[in-house]
């Protein structure tokens, strides 16, 4: 299943590190949840993510606060695409369910 959406990158920080995530819109998350029979850890779902010309394999994770999923965006991807906190990005994902 291929999905494409726009979202705004958020930053989650602790004393030791910061992580950046792209929250999936609720309608996209609902679509994935309706088909997801995954038994992977934490309810994660394997995906290939694409931002601009950058593609990588990762997983999306359920986010109980938003009732959606979040896509982690590692430093290498953020740097290559000039992504910071509050950047709006277009993301395409291929979901493996």
Image: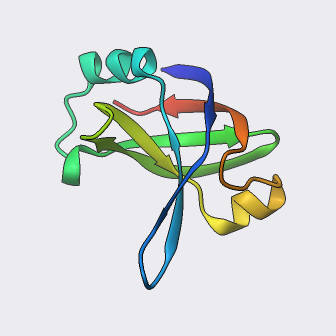
Name the side, left or right, on which 53 lies relative to 89: right
Q: Is residue 26 visible?
A: yes
Q: Is residue 74 above or below residue 43?
A: below
Percent position (x, y) of residue 91? 65, 33
Q: Residue furthest bottom?
A: 16
Q: Is residue 40 visible?
A: no
Name the side, left or right, on which 24 lies relative to 7: left
Which residue is found at the position 55% from the left and 21% from the top? 2
Which residue is found at the position 72% from the left and 44% from the top? 87
Q: Is residue 35 above or below residue 82?
A: above
Percent position (x, y) of residue 57? 55, 51
Nearer to me, 25 or 38: 25
Q: How is colour applied across the structure in the image?
A: rainbow
Which residue is found at the position 72% from the left and 58% from the top? 78
Percent position (x, y) of residue 13? 47, 69
Nearer to me, 47 or 82: 82
The quadrant the C terminus occupies is top left
Name the side, left or right, on which 74 lies relative to 39: right
Nearer to me, 20 or 37: 20
């Amino acid at each position: 299943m291929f999905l494409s959406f726009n979202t705004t990158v958020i930053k989650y920080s602790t004393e030791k590190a910061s992580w950046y995530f792209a929250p999936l819109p609720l309608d996209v998350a609902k679509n994935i949840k309706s088909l997801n029979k995954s038994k992977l850890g934490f309810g994660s779902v394997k995906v290939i993510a694409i931002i601009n010309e950058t593609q990588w394999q990762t997983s999306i994770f359920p986010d109980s606060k938003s009732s959606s999923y979040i896509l982690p965006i590692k430093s290498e991807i953020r740097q290559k695409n000039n992504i910071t906190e509050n950047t709006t990005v277009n993301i395409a994902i291929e979901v493996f369910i």
